[in-house]
Image (cartoon, helix red, strand yellow):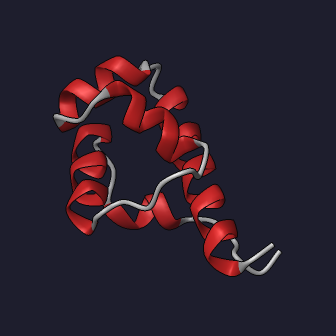
Amino acid sequence: MEKDTKFLILFGKRLNEIRTGKNLSYRVLAQLCDVDHSQISKIEKGNVSIQLKTVFDLALALNVHPKELFNFDLDN
């Protein structure tokens, strides 16, 4: 698997962990970030690359520091 694909998948899994840990649905998180709910699903599946502003918006909506969204091991 290519590193960029792996990165997107791991980022998406981390986003999903945080979102579900806070009992938020795709729709609620999407509303808080002002994005379409289908976009959240695509991010969590690792199907899309997102802008840095979206990372920041996701962190704000989830009430976490942006670095928490990158708390995964890319080397494994």
Quadrant for the C terminus in the image: bottom right
Residue 16 location, x and y as percent? 55, 38
Q: Is residue 66 above or below residue 63?
A: below
Residue 58 location, x and y as percent? 30, 47
Q: Nearer the viewer, residue 45 or 17?
A: 45
Residue occupying image coordinates x 32% and y 39%: 62
Left or right, 4 with reference to 42: right
Q: Is residue 41 above or below residue 25?
A: below
Q: Nearer the viewer, residue 44 or 15?
A: 44
Q: Quadrant of residue 29?
A: top left
Quadrant for the N terminus in the image: bottom right
Q: Nearer the viewer, residue 38 or 54?
A: 38
Residue 40 location, x and y as percent? 42, 36
Residue 25 location, x and y as percent? 43, 18
Left or right, 11 with reference to 9: left
Q: Nearer the viewer, residue 76 or 2?
A: 2
Residue occupying image coordinates x 21% and y 25%: 31
Q: Is residue 12 above or below residue 27?
A: below
Residue occupying image coordinates x 42% and y 23%: 26
